[in-house]
Amino acid sequence: MLPQETLSVLAATAAILAVFLATARRVGNRWYAGAGTVALLGHVAFGALVLPRLPYAWDIARFHHRAVLILNGELPSTNPTINSFSGAQAVLYSVFGTDPTVVAVFNGLCAVLVALPAADLARRLYPNLSTARGLVVTVLFLPLPFVFLTVPMRDALGVLLFFSLLAAVARAYDGETWPAVLGVPLWGALSLLRPELAAVLLLGGAAGGLVRAIDATAERPVTLRGLVALAALPAVAALPLLIRRLPVAPFTERLQRRSVGGATYLDGFSYETGLDVVLAAPARALYFQYAPFPLHVTSAFDLVSVLLLPVLVTLTVTAYRSVRECERDLAVLVLMLTTYVLGVVGYGLVDANFGTTARHRIPFTFLLCVLGAPTLERWATILLGLDSGSSGSVSKQTIRR
């Protein structure tokens, strides 16, 4: 007879697989159904067979402990962002048993479903992009995100909510009602899990909406360069006020709290004034998106992360090339760029640990994938032998603005 833990994982796997196949059938994309099934089973295998044997604990026990307390009718100590996911984890425990592997299986489903709003967002950004198979493959199988989105913590659900909300906002720009209505509970759920992501997405949504309003009323087509030039002067004028009003203490407190462990970077750094925050922002944003660098390798985890550095650089180049050369929706582009820049700068200012950074940058790495979707689609057509009839590849003939 199989152990109870194994039976729980098998039951959870069967239920999650049924949910995914029903979703894929509703989407009506057999190619996604096949690739997603492989990815989902890979998440399950990694969560059940590999993850328990890794020498890393992360915060798995912390979430598990709080979920068990909630399941037993007790109230954990105050921490809304952790307790919100622990509450959802407790629901899974009540159905399948108190095994963190069950959460890894659920996270696998969330990770696979992220490809759907990411692809929808790419098609909204690039109107001529009829398929996004290269983007889907990248989101499903990018190695480090694949690992961290399996870990039984809140990252997978947070990323799914993040991209679902981005896709809903992009559809709302075109006057669709139901995405605007759906965006309210999505934003509320994301605020509970990752309030910082909800905040930057709110600002990004407002920026994109403003661009759509300007574009609808302007006599001439609005360009990205024109918007940058228009915003540059007010930004420079407001900079002295921003420096004086920046709350330095919260940045310093979070930075010190995360500067622990053997995987810290930029040790001993602190903020004394608002000017320190502004001057440090560009360098720390680069560290957040690309670190660790080769000289930082002190463990197997650092080595794996460094091996993916060329991938991150390549994704950045594909994003730049696609945005520059392909027809795109300017409001959606501003939504994504504002969200990306604010998120990378914000996290960069307070993150100082390679492990934490690798998890926190997953949404922004996927944003680079969405921005580079046309180039990824062309590569997928070449490397995977896909039908090139609707590849949406990059072409200088499709420049719009």
Image (cartoon, grey):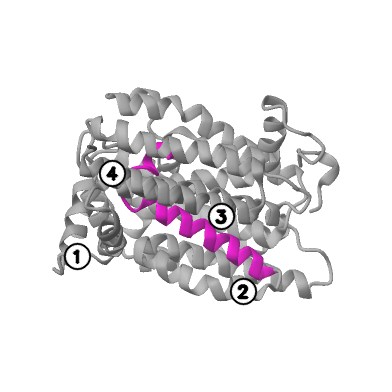
Distance of label 3 from label 4 (alpha carbons): 24 Å
Give the residue at x 43% y 39%. Answer: 145
Could you tell whether 262 is left or right of 195 in the image?
A: left
Instruction: Tell which tag, 3 or 1, sits nearer the viewer.
Output: 3
Instruction: Tell which tag, 1 or 2, sits nearer the viewer.
Output: 1
Earlier in the chain: of badge 1 and badge 2, it is 1
Instruction: Tell which tag, 1 or 4, sits nearer the viewer.
Output: 4
Where on the picture, by quarter, is residue 78?
Answer: bottom left
Residue at label 1? 70
The residue range painted magenta reads: 145-173
Query: Does residue 281 appear anywhere in the picture?
Result: no
Distance of label 2 from label 3 (alpha carbons): 19 Å
Could you tell whether 189 is left or right of 394 in the image?
A: left
Assign a secondary structure to mark 4.
helix
Residue at label 3? 23
Residue at label 2? 178
Distance of label 3 from label 1 (alpha carbons): 30 Å
Give the residue at x 47% y 59%. Answer: 161
Earlier in the chain: of badge 4 and badge 2, it is 4
User: Viewer-proximal residue, 332 or 175?
Assistant: 175
Cβ atoms under marks 4 and 2 closer than 8 Å: no
Residue at label 4? 7
Cβ atoms under marks 1 and 2 closer than 8 Å: no
The tag on residue 198 is none
Where on the picture, by quarter, is residue 259?
Answer: top left
Earlier in the chain: of badge 3 and badge 4, it is 4
